[in-house]
Image (cartoon, rainbow, N blue to C red):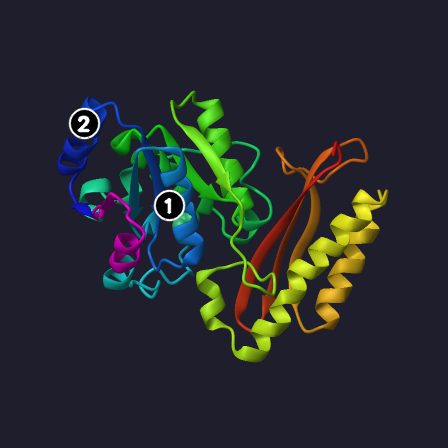
Amino acid sequence: MEQATSVVELRQYVQHWKDHHESIAFVPTMGNLHTGHLSLIEKGQSLCDRTICSIFVNPMQFGANEDFNHYPRTLAQDIKYLESIGCDLVYLPTASELYPLGLEHISQVIVTDLCENYEGAHRPGHFTGVATIVLKLFNIVKPNISVFGKKDFQQYRVISKMVEDLDLDVEIIGAETARESSGLATSSRNQYLDDEQKTLAALIYQTLQDSAAKIQGGERDYPALEMQAIKTLNSAGFDTDYYTVCHAETLEPATQQDMKLVILVTSGLGKTRLLDNIEIDLWH
Ligand code: PAF
């Protein structure tokens, strides 16, 4: 696997591949890779000739009260994983090259309408930090496609809308969430759960599936359904931030006329906030 740390170096590899008419898939990450990330890279490999993964813990998307310094950094292990699945290149940018004047002086990408609620309400400025770094990485890598996990559904929608709104020449692919056999969505945060919490955590996806089945069966009283689901989770020991049936594109609370839905949930278990979602297509 090739490695690049500077923009110049990275662009040389990309140019070489483009000269040979090879298509490029790009998977941006913050490292601490697990099977969920690897499934994004495999998706890229199935669609393009070359796959590039970036690892960069982006300071701009962390709030003042969030621990950027303690974000898990496991570079040696990450590189082993990437090599084991045949990723072509890992890009390891430096903060000094991406933010040469410091974070206060960088232009910001604000994706309208999608960033204020849910994770955006909990983490003000977070999605501006995400959109800004992703746009920079797209401009550096110039990939044909870029793969994002639908586990972070709001992030996937924010990036898709940025690409639509700003006419970026890259196709965004949403990859299905990798799950453990219990249904628990794969996440770096699962490592903070003890065995008992891990077993309990499967209730989140079970509750989502139960709500989806009710909606497919004709239930349209979404506020009542949300209240019921929150009660199920909280009485089992969760502390639910939100559980909302939304329009799958605008992420506005769903109306009875909406046909493509997503239920977004974030629920705390002990000190860990777990995110998950389920898509529902009422056309099918
Ligand atoms: O999902 C992530 O790991 C990050 O938000 C991303 C997309 C790599 C941007 O830093």
The residue beneath circle 1 is 41
* Residue ID at (36%, 40%): 45
* Residue ID at (75%, 31%): 283
Q: From the top left corner, tell me how far across and down residue 144 is, in percent.
A: 35, 28
| Quarter-of-image position of residue 236 | bottom right
Q: Is residue 165 visible?
A: yes
Camera-side residue of 217 and 257: 217
Give the amino acid at mark 1: Ile
Label whose residue precedes the other's in the sequence (2 or 1):
2
Give the amino acid at mark 2: Gln
Q: Is residue 136 positioned above or below 262 on the image?
A: above
Give the magenta part as a residue range.
79-94
* Residue ID at (43%, 20%): 167
The residue beneath circle 2 is 15
Camera-side residue of 259 and 127: 259
Q: Is residue 56 left or right of residue 274?
A: left
